[in-house]
Amino acid sequence: MRILRIGSTGEDVIQLQSTLSILNYNPGITDGIFGVKTASAVIQFQKDYGLVHDGIVGPITWGYLQRQSTAYKIYIIKPGDTFYKIARANNTSLSGLIAANPGLDPQRLRIGQAIQLYPIYLTDPSIRIIYPKDGAILPYGDIEIIWTPVLGATSYTVDVTDRDTALPYLRNYTANVPADKNSFILPKGHLIIGHRYEITVYILDPSTGYNVPKYMPKVNVTIDESPVKSPEILIPQDNTIVSKTNFVLQYVQPDIEGNIDRTLILTSATSSYSTTLKVNTDHPEIPEQLPSFWFDGVPSGEYKAVIVYENRTQSIKLKSEPIQVTLTE
């Protein structure tokens, strides 16, 4: 590698700038022009590694950068490279490669550009995918993926890989989730009954000192051959007026043995207010009046009502279709 300093230009400057960006040294725009901001990033890198901090990238500084590139699995784009070719050659998935390089357009790769091959695996057991559980057999339907919120995260990426498709990259699904959310609903249209899926949640957390995404332990699930019917609210009926002192509930649920939780969620149609009521009962098919004190403090108004059925033994979580009710005194 040639010696680089302020005023240098070319593909090796692109490599320098993009590598420094991955390592969170902020050299500015990756434009192949060695300017003042790139020099400042080089000086900070040299200080951190005990090198002569003159802002000039010679053999010693290049050597330290290359060692970091190896440690963090950084790959330099070559002529003719595409994300698909890189993923195949390095035994990673196309969607995983995209998730490891947030903000990078795979259609606009530049020769000399540094990319991240693999995110970093998290070893903290408290940071994990909460639902679904690893090894779960799920009914065909939308899947709600829930994970532990991570302090300092700036975004999440959910990656779902079909393990039973001959060309998995054609069936992979990737979604970006903002930092203030820790769940995502995977539409059933991206699933095939009988197939196995691997779910990964990536975290972008610059507070660790580099921009390399981390990822939680992967979860593998199977979509059941026999779809399970979602719960259904029978009473109250859709678009009816219900009194807080006479709220009668009746619903049907899947007939599956296990440790079951059933929850009625009322969400206001006019504000951010919502309330969660545990309605565990041995006979949900029989109309039952809910205790009036459950509604103490619940404002009158229009609500969306949903029953959430969760069978923890079978690792199944289903929601009813919402109904609209008007809650009165």
Image: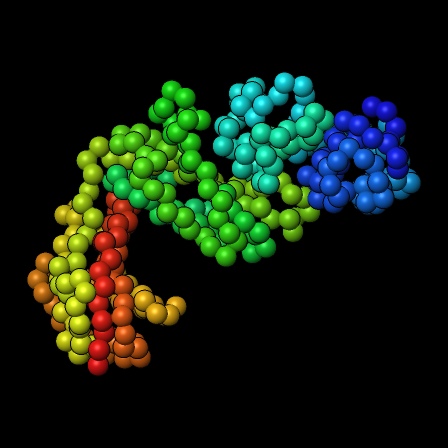
Q: For the point 27% across and 30% down, which residue is it?
A: 194
Q: Residue at left 88%, top 35%?
A: 7
Going 20% across and 38% down the picture, which residue do you hit?
A: 227
How many numbered marks, from 0 up?
0
Q: Nearer the viewer, residue 235 or 214?
A: 235
Say which of 51 and 201 sits in front.
201
Q: Going by the image, does 315 lie left or right of 49?
A: left
Above-or-below relation of 178 to 324: above
Q: Is residue 31 visible?
A: yes
Specify whether 109 is left or right of 28. left
Could you tell me which residue is drawn at 14 percent across and 48 percent down? Answer: 255
> Can you say whether 13 is above or below 41 in the image?
above
Look at the image and tell me in which quarter the N terminus lies.
top right
Position of residue 102 measured from the top left corner of the image (x, y, whole percent)? 58, 40
Residue 247 figure quarter: bottom left
Q: Quadrant of the rendered structure where residue 103 is?
A: top right
The image shows residue 193 at horizontal and vertical percentages of 26, 32
